[in-house]
Amino acid sequence: MSVCVFIAGKSVACLVGLLFSLSWTHSVEKTEWVEHWQTQNELLVLQETFVKGSGAGIDPAPNAVLDDGWYRWKPQTAVVVPSISLANSELTPDNWTLCALDAVTRRAGECIDFAKFEDRGVESFTIKVSR
């Protein structure tokens, strides 16, 4: 199974695997944000969130733990979605990054840096499972 990035309904890049991370820098607070997702059938399931600090628009969940400068938490209720829609904003200091994760170590493997799509005049992206 693969997780793919779609632009205007067409697949432009894919990663093979069941686990992946989506990371970015918050546009206002300039704070790092990482989410770990798992594919399950044709759906995406949020596993854990990591945020490097807090501030405007960044409220760690009530069950968040501060660990080495990162707030981290797992959803208290399942977050299951068919796709993730992302805006391409000039306000965000760096681009979205999608990385395959090792199932045991959770370390990032192959990554897709959305900066590679900048020259296409893209306004939005969709991430979804593809067979």
Image (cartoon, rainbow, N blue to C red):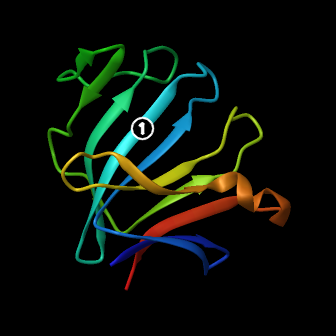
For image coordinates 63% across by 22% down, the residue present is 28
Q: Which residue is at the front of the view, 116 or 105?
A: 105
For image coordinates 35% across by 31% down, the residue present is 50
User: At which x and y percent is residue 4?
Assistant: 49, 71
For image coordinates 17% across by 23% down, the residue present is 63
Query: Left or right: 94 with respect to 90?
Result: left
Q: Which residue is at the front of the view, 11 or 116?
A: 116
User: At which x and y percent is residue 75?
Assistant: 20, 40
Name the quadrant of the C terminus.
bottom left
Name the quadrant of the N terminus.
bottom left
Q: Give the tally of numbered discs.
A: 1
Query: Left or right: 102 with respect to 56?
Result: left
Query: Left or right: 82 with respect to 85?
Result: left
Relative vertical location of residue 105 with respect to residue 6 in this rendering, above or below = above
Q: Amino acid at mark 1?
A: Val
For image coordinates 36% across by 13% down, the residue present is 69
Relative vertical location of residue 69 with respect to residue 14 in this rendering, above or below = above
Q: Which residue is at the front of the view, 99 or 82?
A: 99
Q: Which residue is mark 1?
A: 34
Image quadrant in which you'd find residue 27: top right
Relative vertical location of residue 106 with respect to residue 118 in this rendering, above or below = above
Q: Which residue is at the front of the view, 91 or 66?
A: 66
10 Å crowding of disc 1: few (<14), some (14-19), many (20+): many
Image quadrant in which you'd find residue 3: bottom left
Image quadrant in which you'd find residue 10: bottom right
At mark 1, the secondary structure is strand
Query: Left or right: 121 with respect to 1?
Result: right
